[in-house]
Every structure is written in structure tokens, then in C-alpha cells.
Amino acid sequence: MEINGFQIYKFNQYSLDERAKMSICPLCSELRKKKTDKCASLHWDSGLGICHHCGESFQLHTYKKKAEVKEFNRPTKWNYTTLSDNLVKWFQSRGISQFTLRMLKVGEGKESMPIKGSWIERNTIHFNFFENNEIVNIKYRDGEKNFKLFKGAKLIFYNLDSISISKEAVIVEGEIDCLSFAEAGINKVVSTPNGSTLKAVNLEYLDNCIEYFDNKDKIYLALDNDEAGRNVTKEFIRRLGAERCFLVDFKDCKDANEYLLKYGAESLALTIKEAKEVPIDGVSSVSDWDSEYDNFLLKGMGKGFTIGKKHFDGIFSTYTGQYIVVTGIPSSGKSDFVDQMCIGYNLQYGWKIAYASPENKPNVIHASKLEAKICGQWISKPEQINSLWHKSAKEFIDNNFKFIDLDRFELDEVLSKTKRLISKFGIKVLVVDPYNKVKLKSAANKNVNDYTNEYLNRIDEFARINDILIILVAHPVKPSGEERKVYEPDFYSIKGGGEFYDMSPHGLLVHRDYDLDMVKVKVLKVKFQHLGENRKYIWCKWNRLNGRYIEYDHQSEKPEMCSGILDDNSNWIVEAENGIKQDEIEFINPNKNIEPNYNFDNDYEPDGQHIPF
């Protein structure tokens, strides 16, 4: 049995009369003098009960959830029954009533908080996170706006259960904004657990409960009216689909709570009714990109996305919504270089990668190559299997790299799988390696030029619509025996090469000089001048210890004149996490003198008054 697309796990979990439309409240009746007063209305068709005495809603049933792969810590103690007068008064100053605090199960208590490198016990607000009526996380906030989440707990939206079976949902950026909408009578509202930043957008909390949005007809995005909030709003639209997203306008206010205080609860509720559809894709006017246009007139176009390699980044960068063709003769190392590009995009911007790579099977070999590049060494000894760096690398690859496995690789099926990966995991890069083994079945009977044209049009359209970067690895035609040693292919060397050159925004060549034991990486084409330099190239060396490409510090058009190379065997994950270089591949906790029972997010700094307790 199911309701609104959700499979029921336990029907009528409170054993109420299934024929009744009114009943006692399973949440408050036991605590009242009139214990038998039928104060709750039961809606069996939607599976929801609403108490007209305590104001709380409850689920009549429990619902099946998808099996979780990861194990999470859970808080064992929580309390929302008693709040101090000071805390209630402070929330009242923010426009939030005690009724709303109780409805969303806000608590209070002593907690050890991380303050300037040490742990100090403070009185804190407890924002309790529930999933299917079970507590899974707590965010603590003290009077000086220090925050932390329960260590190792599952990241989900705050107030997630409120949207479990509803057809609509409102997404805000902070727990107080969530309380503000609830105060205004908008109860189907959830909050991100850690705010927004100008850095790479990490929606792990959406990954952990994406199924809650499968049945939504309308999703109202009411995030902060600043650059960070707009950045996350854009990613939500990409992940959840523009066709069902609506944009909430806070006018001259930064967020929902500021709007509540300035314009009142009734006006805040109206922002949902007045929310606008996401603008039609492919149609715009100057007003849609006014500031961007002025900035272009003054400063020109900025550099595109890079992979974190000094010399290569100097001659090539890219945008999302486009594709790159990478070519080179067999065994030139083009797939290896594409892997290094993908790792670079991940470490630089947090992008997640999907591979449709028939030539890189089995997956265990491909994953081992990724791990060697990431960690600086190949796994070759039994003791390495139990090392912390290997375990961390496996988790890192599991979280950031997905492998598309098909019996027959067809482009439409690959793009369909990628679309689902974009929604569920936020994939930002798709690698098709090689393109000639991922067939476009609908164009199979066309001549080579028409086939290539339709193939590249399909790739281009998918990249633009989904705002991802696609990398196509394309083999050139085979040279004769005489030419093989000096053969350096270009776009026209690929089968259907004329179409590749005309249609592709970007092209790269990876070419190995076996005599010099060096690798040339050359820009065959770059669409816009500010993104790179056509026909420019760099020389690098392949590091046999880990499969990385290492640039020569001093570049020259003549490879024998290049110099200044230093093997890089460091662990890139450690460097990214700690901001330090480590020659020895060990994971070291930079806060080892701090009690490691909790973690917290320093990036989350919502506006508001200090709490007077």
C-alpha cells in the first residue's frame, strides 16, 4: 500500500479508530485533563493527523525508506519540553512565538562549544533534526553565534518530516527562517543544515533525502537574498528541475526572518503565493544579466574553470554547459590526462564526476588509477589496505566519482543515467571514453558526417540544459607504419573530423614523445580567446609512481630545453582538507588537542542578534 507515491511501512502506527475522522491526539491527550476529548482531525487519504489543541501535525503511518549505505551517529538525548524565559523572549524579539518553538521541537541545554581552539560549556539552542519521527541530528547555537552539528550524524534538511507526503515544499537557508515561515502558517518548510557559501556548493543533505522531493509538484526556493544564497538556489534548480521550482522574492530583505520582522506574518505568507516561475530557459533580456553585463563592459570576460596546474591553466580553461574533445594516438595517455583533469575540477570546485568509459573497465582498475593520482602512490602492499589514507581515499572516490555500467553503451541511455545522477548526486562532469564505443543508435544508418553532427548536437544540448561539462575522448584514424613515430593527430585526424573541428567548442591533444619520454598537451581549439590560446602547448612528464602528469617549471617550444621538474608524490586529499603539504602520506588531525566528539561549520553565519543567556 502507498500514499502519494510513498510505500507504507506500518499502517495506523497509533492504533486509532480507522473509521473515525476525529480522535484523541497521540501527542498531547495523555497529558491533558480531558484525556478523551477528540481534538485531532484524521485525514486517512493523506495519512496526516492535525491536533486542534496543541497545533501539531503527525503522521498516521510510517513509511518505507531506501536502505542507507552509510552508517551515521545519532544523538541519544534530546529535549524540547522546557525553554527558559530568556530564550523565549529572545525568539519573541525575532517574531517567533513559543507555540512555533514547540511545534518545531526547538530545545535548550548546556553544551560544550568550540570557541577559539578550545571547548567551553555554554547554554545553547538545540535545533533537533527528525527523519520519520526519529532524531538523527542536532544543531547547537550559543549566544555568540557559535554553531556545531552532532559529530558523524546524518546531514538532512531541518523539519524534513513536514514535507514527507506533501505535494509542495518551501526550502529556506536557516532554522530561524524555517521557524519564521511556520509562524506565518506555512508549515511545509525545510531548512538547509549549514547555510550557503561562495565556495563550491555541497548538497550532501539533499543527496541523503532526495526521495522526499520525488513526489513534489511545486518547490519554493526562499534562500537568502545574497550571492551565496543565489548560488545555492541555482544548484537546487539544476538538481530538482526548473519546471517545478518557484522563486520567492524577499524584496529589500535578506531572508525570511528579516521579512517577517519588517512586513509581518501575513505578508511573509503571501511571498509563497506571489512566487515566480523560474525564467524560461533560452530566453532572456538585459535586465536578467544587468550586473554581469556592466562588469563585462568594465573588465571583459574572466578566466574559465581550471584544473589547478599552473602552465596548463595558463593556456586552457573552460565553462560548464560545453564539451571538450580530447584526442591522441593509442597509449598516448589521453585517458590518464582526462582523469587528472577530473580530479583537478573536483579538488578546485567540488565537482562530482560520472564516467561512461567502456575502455576503462573493469571499474576496479579505473578506481585504482584514480586513487594513485589522488594519494600519490599505488596500492601494492598488504599493509596499505588497512591504512587510514587508503580508507579515506575509497570514501572520497565513492562520494565523488560514479561509474556508469551498461551491457551495451548507447548514448541516449548514458545521458538518461547521467540525468538521474545529476538529480541524485549533483554530477557536474560526464566523461565519455571513447566516444566511438558509446553509440548513437538513432543515427546508426547515417553517413559519418551526419552521424557525427547529430552526436555532437546531442552532447552540446545535454551539456547546456544541465549545466555540466562533458569530456569526449576520441581516437584518431590509425596512421601507417611509416608515420606512426612522428604522427601527431589533430581534429581532422578523427573520423568525421571536419564536424569535430567546426562544432566543438574545445579540443585538446595528448601526445607522447617516446624518444624523450615526455608528453605534449596541446590546445587544438578554444572557442573564446579569454579561455585559452589556440595551438599553444605545454610539456610534462608522466610520474610512474602514481600516474600523475607533472609540468616542467620552465617551458620551451623545444622539449629538450624544458627543465625544472619535481615529482609530486604528496597526498592531495590531505592538502585539500588541511591546507598544508605533507610529504609523508598520513592523515593528521590539525585539531588533535580538541575534544573530537563534535564538529561544526564555521561558514554558517546567519544575521541576527546575540542571544542574551
Image: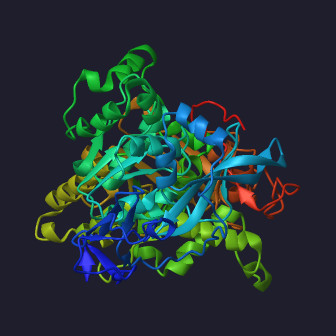
Residue 133: % across, % down = 48, 69
* Residue found at the far right of this picture: 593
Image quadrant in which the C terminus is located: top right
Residue 78: % across, % down = 64, 63
Q: Say which quarter of the image contains residue 298.
A: top left
Q: In this view, does 568 lie above or below 529?
A: below
Residue 431 in view in this figure: no
Camera-nearest residue between 59 and 560: 59
Q: In this view, does 110 lie above or below 212?
A: above
Which color scheme does this rendered protein use? Answer: rainbow
Residue 289: % across, % down = 32, 25
Q: Say which quarter of the image contains residue 416.
A: bottom left
- On screen, residue 587 versus residue 177, left or right, reads right
- On screen, residue 490 versus residue 596, left or right, reads left
Q: Say which quarter of the image contains residue 603.
A: top right
Camera-nearest residue between 347 and 608: 608
Camera-nearest residue between 549 and 377: 377
Task: Say which residue appears at 24% left-offset and 70% top-offset.
Answer: 4
The count of marks equals 0
Camera-nearest residue between 114 and 429: 114
* Residue found at the far front of this picture: 33
Task: Say which residue appears at 38% left-offset and 16% top-offset.
Answer: 294
Image quadrant in which the N terminus is located: bottom left
* Residue found at the far top of this picture: 298
Residue 156 in view in this figure: yes
Residue 248: % across, % down = 32, 37
